[in-house]
Amino acid sequence: MILVLAHELGSFEQAAEDFQDSSQEWRRLFSELLGTFFLVLVAAGGGMMGQAFPGTISRTAAVVAPALMVLAVILFMGKVSGAHLNPAVSIAFALRRDFPWWRVPGYVIVQLAGAALAAWFLQAVVHVSATYGSNYPAAHFSSGDAFLMEMVLTFGLVSVILGTASGAQNLGVIGALGVGGYIALAGLWGSPISGASMNPARTFGPDAIGADFHAYWVYIAGPLAGAVIAVGTAFVLRGRGGGRAGSGAAQGALREEIAQPDQA
């Protein structure tokens, strides 16, 4: 048991040391850009494909596809950057002291860039406006209604993320199932009012390429407010952040292990 604990402590310390290695920052940023690109590719792609090919994409498929993509991205690149894919998640981890504040601007910039690249790609290939892949308050519902929906949905999402990355509840890679499952469930019932974005980057990409920001404040203020409430709730449930499990989940565990070839 002592040897196991010593090994885990050594692994965490190595991961923390790796994460502080600024020479690897470009890999983390590229991971966030690529992961957000894939997320928005399917999240915005559902609406845009539905416009280009009417009747082929159901609302269920449109909300489940991004959930499955998030699950996949967490599994295949979560160890590199933490797979935030969402400015609200990056800020929540920083508020919990599981992620350094000085890294937040870089993560947010590449998340927005990845989202915009995905929307640009879709508009170029599908030949419909990227606005069909964005999120807007539903007809006959106010921006305030959509704000409240985004706030509550994001509160739940960030609570799941923080909860599955902490202490005794740390589920490791299986936490990806919890996050993906929540996104699907939230979208299934919450998307008719606000689109269930829960992510300022996801909405930014289509809005930027489609040049329509008329309700974008909802998709900034709602997710950020929900993230702050989730951080406060996490403090009530589990105390302060900054622990081993939460920091490991937020920061990833990027290592560079290069085997040197035998010299002849």
Image (spheres, rainbow, N blue to C red):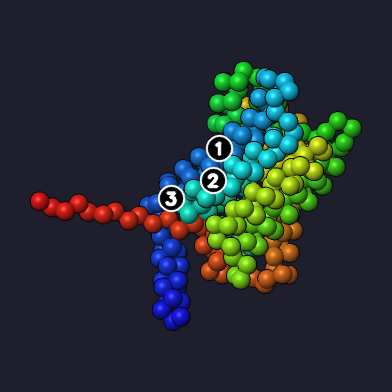
Q: Position of residue 161 (x, y in %)?
A: 64, 57
Q: Residue at x 32, y 56 (%)?
A: 257
Q: Residue at x 59, y 45 (%)?
A: 70
Q: Is residue 220 visible?
A: no
Instruction: Report crowding for label 1: few under 14, some 14 to 19, many 20 or more residues within 10 A (C-alpha).
Output: many
Q: Position of residue 156 (x, y in %)?
A: 73, 54
Name the residue beneath numbered marker 1. 38
Determine the CA span between mark 3 and mark 1.
20 Å
Q: Residue at x 39, y 57 (%)?
A: 255
Mark 2 vs 1, N-terminal side: 1
Mark 3 vs 1, N-terminal side: 3
SS for dot 1: helix
Amino acid type indicated by mark 3: Glu
Q: Residue at x 89, y 32 (%)?
A: 140
Q: Which of the 4 image quarters holds residue 191? A: top right
Name the residue beneath numbered marker 3. 25
Q: Nearer the viewer, mark 3 or mark 1?
A: 1
Mark 2 vs 3, N-terminal side: 3
Would residue 68 appear left or right of 154 to someone viewing this image?
left
Q: Is residue 112 above or below residue 261?
A: above
The label shown at residue 187 is: none
Would residue 47 appear left or right of 41 to someone viewing this image?
right
Instruction: Report crowding for label 2: few under 14, some 14 to 19, many 20 or more residues within 10 A (C-alpha).
Output: many
Q: Position of residue 15 (x, y in %)?
A: 43, 63
Amino acid type indicated by mark 2: Val
Residue farthest toward the top in the current orientation of the protein: 127
SS for dot 2: helix
Residue farthest toward the right in the current orientation of the protein: 140
Q: Position of residue 198 (x, y in %)?
A: 70, 45
State if disc 1 and disc 2 touch (CB < 8 Å).
Answer: yes
Name the residue beneath numbered marker 2. 73
